[in-house]
Image: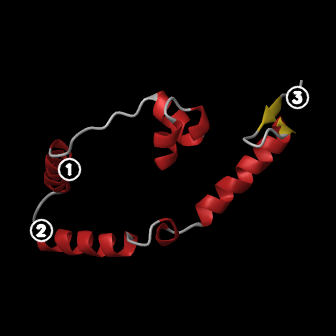
Amino acid sequence: MLTSYTNHDSRSFSALEFVEKATERFEEVMKATPEDLNPAVPTVLEESDLRHRTTSEQSFDAYRRMRYDELDRMVASRRPVYLDMNFWIAIRDPKEARHPQKASAL
């Protein structure tokens, strides 16, 4: 029994085609280097390496705890934003939103 799938363009394709396309996309992504995905990666890695070299007497667990604490302080200082399903629908199709003009402005 072959299952049929539909993509975002409403084009149907078989399970085999689905797997082939997913495999192609996976291989394409896996070929990408971190720099391809985010050009800031080399700078961040260099800064991290420098920071680690200056604290080489520190154990990995202590370093990890320090970094978690830094992250915790940063996140705690930010205001949370909760986006409900209606927000995503409005972004996807502003004409269908409760307030189409406001949604279009997003």
Front residue of this view, candidates 59 and 54: 54
Q: Which residue is mark 1?
A: 71
Residue mark closest to the camera, 2 vs 1: 1
Which of the numbered marks, if any, corresponds to residue 2? 3
Q: Which residue is mark 2?
A: 55
Residue 97 % position (x, y)? 54, 32
Give how far apart the Cα atoms at labels 2 and 1 are: 18 Å
Front residue of this view, candidates 30 and 97: 97
Give how far apart the Cα atoms at labels 2 and 3 are: 57 Å
Task: Tell me if residue 73 comes above or below residue 86 in the rendering.
Answer: below
Give the side of residue 12 with respect to residue 19, left or right: right
Could you tell me which secondary element the residue under label 1 belongs to? helix
Count neighbours of disc 1 (C-alpha within 10 A) and say few if under 14, some if 14 to 19, many if 20 or more: few
Count neighbours of disc 2 (C-alpha within 10 A) and say few if under 14, some if 14 to 19, many if 20 or more: few
Could you tell me which secondary element the residue under label 3 belongs to? loop
Task: Tell me if residue 97 comes above or below residue 79 in the rendering.
Answer: above
